[in-house]
Image: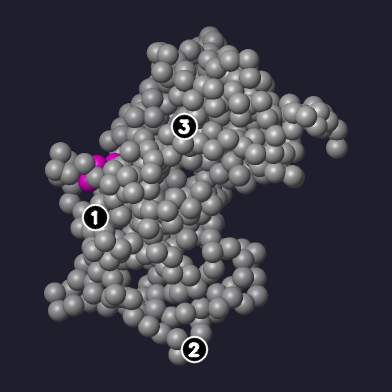
Amino acid sequence: MAEQKPKKKGLNLNRLDMPRQDPKVRITNFNEVALGYTAEMAMEEAERCLECKKPLCVDGCPAEVKIPEFIHLIKEGKFIEASLKIKETNALPAVCGRVCPQEEQCEEVCVLAKKGAPVAIGRLERFVADYEAAQGEAKKPEIAPPTGKKVAVVGSGPAGLTVAADLAVLGHKVTIFEALHKAGGVLVYGIPEFRLPKSIVQREVDYITSLGVELKTDVVVGKTFTVDDLLTEEGYDAVFLGVGAGLPWFMEIPGENLNGVYSANEFLTRSNLMKAYRFPEYDTPICVGKKVAVVGGGNVAMDAVRSALRLGAAEAHIVYRRSRAEMPARAEEIENAEEEGVIFNMLVNPIEILGDENGWVKGMKCIRMELGEPDSSGRRRPVPIEGSEFIMDVDMVIMSIGTGANPLIPSTTPDMEVNKWGYIVADPNTCKTTKKGVFAGGDIIRGAATVILAVGDGKTAAREIHNYLTTGEW
């Protein structure tokens, strides 16, 4: 390994903490929990970067951000230049700086992580993006001359926004079609305000439309147009499908049809996109129990349980069939939930939801679990403990056990292959589907995953679409 060897005197193994709202205060509001670095804090944290000659952090970033270069600019106090350096490869720095799991990607392979804490790459990315926005209108890259080619992007989540931005800079005419009334996909309907303020998502969307991208909302591809309509009657030369995986999964246990049982998708969409958290200004119906159980252990489960607390639940529980060590949620989100008073029920699995005479949830029958041998996910398989059944006293249940692919587009595009789970089959190296001229990326090809992986797919697809449009080769 040929990293630059640090001078011992300058080696700082401790990252700078980012200020956060006090837990007792933040559970009473939906304001952002993490408050961000000041300029002085950002420069102090940036000084920890060793600027390795072979930066492993760049290899760990799906968006190919030039990490040592933007951090070097922060050291010099050139914050605008640092933001522009990130945007050379990532059009969503303020989003990615907040919600991407850097601890599993760029920060995981940071040289400093071997002996202490890695450089806080995500926090620095967030800082420079916010700093640039605070100075006024964002600077735009040079746009290539028009190519005369048209691209339809279906879905305005992180994959769709990324591919649209990259193709617009290359001179193509890009139109995004979004089924909902607001752009952003999971960034607006799924992630709560306290983790990702919607004004920041809108800021990133506005930047992308400023590049010349046209945005059309309330258009359901598969209903308003089919993919074939886009390629023929509408005259698009290529189509990118970034429609996410928003079909909720349930456990198929007795009682899931009772009043007071939500999917995490519905609960979060009502709270976030439909703004139930701002009642009565927004009169969105949402019923929050006094004792809420969220079933699952991922980031979506953390978002749901923390939202329930803020919406008035007296008790909010996580019910998870494995142990803390197997939870897929980010450690930071688990820690935030614990600080806010969320009760964790580990090695517990629901087997029935119980209702009262009026059809409302009054409890949940569960069974205790123990961990056996690892399964296909690499995590130890949970095994029921015979005779350990018990009843949890809850009056609301939110199922957060994953999502699947909406079948609308595949069902109206019969010559495009899907796998046995209903996800679109696409080459992970090119994002090409089995239908000529159609590309796909993000959750619709791999299942529910991270924002940054979707951004990476968007970048890959943009390169391949550009190549297809300029050479005609498939």
Element class at badge 1: loop
* Of the image marks 2 and 1, the number of the one nearer the N terminus: 1
Question: Does residue 433 appear to the left or right of 263 in the view shown?
Answer: right
Q: Which residue in the protein does label 1 denote?
A: 312
Q: How many marks?
A: 3
Residue bearing mark 3:
36
Q: Which residues are magenta?
A: 272-276
Q: Residue at x 30, y 63 (%)?
A: 315
- Callout 2 amino acid: Glu
What residue is shown with label 2?
386
Q: CA distance from mark 2 to mark 1?
A: 36 Å
Of callouts 2 and 3, which one flags the residue occurring earlier in the amino acid sequence?
Answer: 3
- Residue 437 on the magenta span: no
Crowding at mark 1 (Cα within 10 Å: few <14, some 14-19, many 20+): some
Q: Is residue 70 visible?
A: no
Q: Is residue 287 visible?
A: yes
Spatial CA span between label 2 and label 3: 48 Å
Viewer-side residue, 429 vs 293: 293
Quarter of the image where the C terminus is located: top right
**Where is residue 67 shown, x and y percent of the image?**
65, 28
Of the residues shown, which amino acid type is indicated by label 3?
Gly
**Closer to the N terminus: mark 1 or mark 3?**
3
Between circles 2 and 1, the one closer to the viewer is: 1
